[in-house]
Image (cartoon, rainbow, N blue to C red):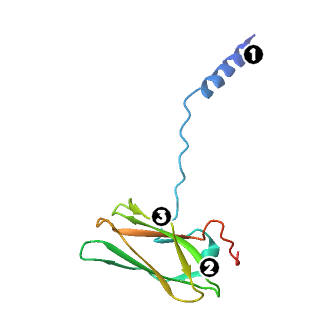
């Protein structure tokens, strides 16, 4: 009888513990800080070459960004990019939708964008191949 009571108490304890409030599932810390230029694949990163962005502020306080970029392969590339302008706390002030860009083979080119909010302090440019684009080098 003593064993039966012990088993019942153990079962009730397990049941009560399972009915408690469960903790939330928390996100993992990302060990990588965000950069100003991101590529969505290694293939796109390998196929392009960029230089350090040129950043200037005009007389109205708007941020102007020029990113030198080129196709680093002997093929014309079709890419898409989007730009986000960030405030001092890296909160998004304005984000543009995806835009198309054609990069001629091995020919220097550039992407030029500007903020519409003078509070813009930084930017981020993301690149991808267009959805459904069959890339010959992958």
- Identify the residue position indicated by label 2 in the image: 46
Q: Earlier in the sequence, mark 2 or mark 3?
A: 2
Q: Nearer the viewer, mark 2 or mark 3?
A: 3
Q: What residue do we see at 66% from left, 18% from top?
A: 9
Between residue 60 and residue 86, name the one nearer to us.
60
Secondary element under disc 2, as helix, strand or loop, is helix
Q: Quadrant of the N terminus?
A: top right
- As drawn, the label of residue 120 is none
Single out the mark in the foreground, 1 or 3: 3
Q: CA distance from mark 2 to mark 3?
A: 24 Å
Q: Nearer the viewer, residue 80 or 67?
A: 80
Disc 1 designates what residue? 3
* Secondary structure category for the residue under label 1: helix
Name which residue lies at 60% across and 69% down. Answer: 130
Relative image position of residue 35 (x, y in whole percent): 47, 70
Q: Which one is in front in this view, the residue at disc 1 or the one at disc 2?
A: 2
Q: Quadrant of residue 91?
A: bottom left
Q: Is residue 123 left or right of residue 2?
A: left
C-alpha span from label 1 to label 3: 68 Å
- Label at residue 97: 3
Q: Is residue 107 above or below residue 34?
A: below
């Amino acid at each position: 009888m003593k064993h039966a009571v012990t088993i019942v108490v153990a079962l009730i304890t397990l049941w009560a513990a399972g009915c408690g409030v469960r903790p939330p599932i928390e996100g993992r810390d990302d060990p990588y800080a965000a950069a100003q230029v991101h590529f969505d694949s290694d293939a796109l990163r390998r196929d392009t070459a960029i230089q350090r962005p040129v950043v200037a502020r005009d007389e109205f306080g708007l941020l102007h960004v020029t990113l030198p970029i080129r196709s680093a392969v002997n093929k014309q590339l079709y890419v898409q990019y989007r730009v986000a302008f960030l405030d001092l706390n890296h909160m998004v002030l304005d984000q543009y939708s995806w835009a198309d860009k054609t990069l001629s083979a091995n020919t220097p080119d550039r992407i030029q964008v500007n903020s519409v909010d003078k509070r813009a302090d930084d930017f981020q440019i993301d690149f991808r191949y267009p959805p459904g684009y069959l890339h010959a080098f992958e």
